[in-house]
Amino acid sequence: MVSPARVASSIVDSENRNGGGGVDSRFVHLRSVQWRINLRILPSEASASIDELRRVTADARRRYAGLRRRILVDPPKGENISPDVVIDDPLSQNPDSAWGRFFRNAELEKVVDQDLSRLYPENGSYFQAPACQGMLRRILLLWCLTHPEYGYRQGMHELLAPLLYVLHVDVQRLSQVRKIHEDHFTDKFDDIFFAESNLSLKGKTGNVDENSSHENEIKVHSLNELEPEIQTIVLLSDAYGAEGELGILLSDRFLEHDAYSMFDALMCGGNGGAVAMIDYYSPSPASGSHTGLPPVIEASSALYHLLSVTDSSLHSHLIELEVEPQYFALRWLRVLFGREFSLEDLLKVWDEIFVSDNDKLTSATEDDVGTGLDILHSSRGAFIAAIAVTMLLHLRSSLLATETATSCLQRLLNFPEDIDVEKLIKKAKTLQTLALETSVHSSPPPLLNHAFDKSKSAAVRGHSLSTGSVSPRTPLNLARESYWEEKWRVLHKAEELRQGSTSSTAGKKGFSEKIRRSLIRAESVPSPTEIKSAKRESRVPVRRSLLEDLSRQLGSEEDIEVSAPKDPSSVEIKVEGEQGLLENKVERSFLMDNIVSEDSSIFSARSSLSGDNDLENDSEKSCAGSSSSVVENEDLENEEEQSEDPLPVSYPTGSSTQNLEIGDTAHKQVVGLKERKPPSGKFPWFWKFGRNASEVTFEKGSNMEASRSSSVSNNQNNVPGLPITDACSISYRDMSEKNVMGSLKNLGQTMLEIFRPDLVVAGQIATKRENSVIESVFQQDRGQVGENLSKNILVEKGQVTAVAALKELRKISNLLSEM
Amino acid sequence: MVLVLALGDLHIPHRASDLPAKFKSMLVPGKIQHIICTGNLCNKEVHDYLKSLCPDMHITRGEYDEDARYPETKTLTIGQFKLGLCHGHQVIPWGDLDSLAMLQRQLDVDILVTGHTHQFKAYKHEGGVVINPGSATGAFSSITYDVNPSFVLMDIDALRVVVYVYELIDGEVKVDKIDFKKAATSHSSH
């Protein structure tokens, strides 16, 4: 009697063979199995039988079990130590000692635990369960101990978590199927229901055989009649198939083993794969690299290269702002977008990534290898790059709208949650083919030739800044005009494209509505330090088009607020000014710490810039401007110092090293711009006013605080600047109308006072009062913002205030144009 | 896996200025879970230094200790073992095993740690263990010739304790290891 397993598997196999030997589509519904096939853990030929799969799985599991036994062992008790052997004592400073290893493992475990405790806290049910945490910990420890040259880096836990989750989901599916189709999971082997029949083996076996085999035949038929999906599940989990229990592909017992093999394959690229995540964690250049840069930097520049091919205006805009790709791409690549999407979306993205083949493309010529486009040399890598570029394009309009690097980064690092992943993936697929072509035909990106070398980077940046400001204003003016026009066009297009698909606002109320909607899609969670970061503005604003844009954005900013959920990923970067978020601070500083150790100090500057927690009102000198880059750089330093205060215990060394590094680069920039401070001071301030006033910030208090603290160190500059813009922008979000009006009037007054510095002080005091009022309201405000209800309220009230604010701004702009 | 450091009779600042450098380099914070100190430190500075190695510190009074608040004897439980601590100048004759055994029975402990003689000793006696960690600084003693600096590290693990003895002999740190099992059928001692 043929066993049902064999019968069914042959049927399944024949189906597959008929369908062509290329893609194995048996397991598309079982993610864990599909991923294991794609990661090359399981044989990927469509002709691989269930038995083969089981055997391979069992082997992998045995390997893991052996590994675990070997490595996670307690320090030796030394029962049989011969007198010749040096005694291994706990205080031994011998690096080979088992005790030394024990203590080092304990250290590693502490580091891993810190990360694990912060893993997906919002999906707390699964990942924070102790069983799951234990498994994750063991897997990470084992992997790091088997790969001592890499150690543990923050982010590895995020790569591992979805893998484990996927396995878990499949096991749950299995138990579901088990419940429904109980009869197929009974303990039947050798086709005889021994458990169910009382008959002994000897007597009347003939009849029993006939009956049971008859039943079995029925069962076999019904097995085949089941959907292929259920069939495969049954076969994969048959306890009596090949390798017995060890071969059950979807097994609760061996989650850890399977997750480990998946993680290992992902990190090391599978068997000879091109994309190995581990590369993105190593700080040293890859062996074949011509550029001598760490692989993640190379991959980031490859991203930019692809972007330049697909959308050169966005690319040049980002280059202009000096948003270096690794600022955001580091996180994107290292965690394979794990922090940008929600878990469900992420699984879909990863489905596609893993489906793409990981072989190194042979079409890559000798010249291309090692030029930094390595990521594009495989289908999978090309897809990853394509996804990244698609994400950039998704944020295109908002990125083009920003004029500061920090705000760009804020948008990039707080990727919106309410996105249509399917569309993103489809678009990425089209880009993938483009990427693959690019890798073959184009020359290495020019970016790699400068500004990545750390020793030169600061100088180069300073140089480029100064040249930018020294050169006559007109070229920039022209660039500006076209930029704004283009933005307008983009907005229109975006609006047409996205009209039916957004959810938050209902009805078409006209122009501002349309723009609002498109900007919802475009805008990510608002950047926290819009106002505070008066960065590097050496470009002359084109007032009129600016004001147009301003009015547009005013109409939309409330919705920006709407689209600002408590983004879990943003928690990492945005630090909220509330009490119970110490752990976020720690996480941020930890991130900063790690990044410092990874030699990307600029990135850490970014992350730390994005939030300060003190809400004190030392607004004595609050109005000193910080418009020039001089001030801005001191901002940076002060921000750093500020951020140190709440974290004195945990990571003082981390942030202080950042301070030093930022200070270095800051000073270099300072040198290039000092002489230009007075005249440029006013214009950028004004321009910034326009920008900042319309942009929404989430942590107003922190921004104000930061700007005040920055002003503490500055002399009273000619520009009253920032806190006024703070007040202005805060007021736009404010619930009370009169505050809006009051502060706007204030604003108008103080703007007149720009050119009459003696009255600056008076204006300051006035704004100080305003600010304190606003802040108190804002604090309450913030407490509610997390809820959806309040968002709606804000939208409504925001619309009302927006109109009023718009009027006020028009007035002010008229005033200014008179001057 | 509980590591317990036992030391005493440092006599800082009267008879010695500091722990030997080699000992100091071995004693780093973070590895040791408990410190038991037989007494005669004698300073507050030494007390603070030992506290920095491990926050859980137990100490009994030696006759030269400047802090009079330390108790005469102390008992604590670590894992399955009961430890007793006493300086030892109270038990006469000094260093006599039977008298120490009497004290052990009195305190009802499995491991008795005493000092005062400035000489390392480890006995298995009547189902219990008597340990003398000696003097960690090698301070002068009127009852012992040629004092070598020594201290003891105990690794307590359920029913088994491994005693590592660190002695500074001729400028080199020598480690020795002794195994004790509690109330088990086999008494395995080195």
Image: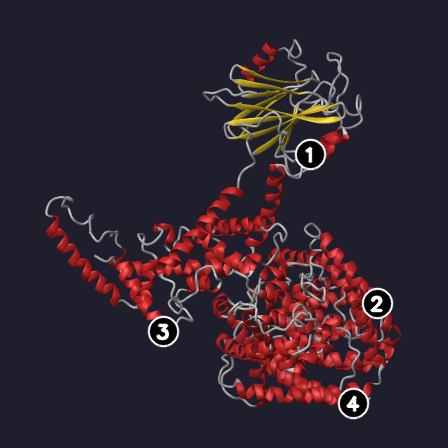
Label 2 in the same subunit as label 1 = no
Left or right: residue A4 versus residue A781 is left
The correct choice, above or below, for A252 with respect to A576 in the image is above
**Of labels 3 and 2, the one closer to you:** 3
Residue B156 to residue A335: above or below: above
- N-terminal of the pair, mark 2 or mark 4, is 2
Which residue is at a point 29% across and 68% down the rendered structure image? Answer: A227
**What amino acid is at disc 1?**
Lys
Which x, y percent locates residue A399? 65, 78
Which dot, 2 or 4, sits closer to the camera? 2
Question: In front of the other: label 3 or label 1?
Answer: 3
**Spatial CA span between label 1 and label 4:** 71 Å
| Residue A813 appears in the rendering | no
* Residue under pointer 1: B51
Is there a contact, CB below 8 Å, between mark 2 and mark 4?
no
Q: Which residue is mark 3?
A: A19
Query: Which of A564 and A133 lies nearest the eye of the viewer?
Result: A133
Q: CA distance from mark 3 to mark 4?
A: 72 Å
Q: Amino acid at mark 4?
A: Ser
Please state which amino acid type lies under the numbered disc 2: Lys
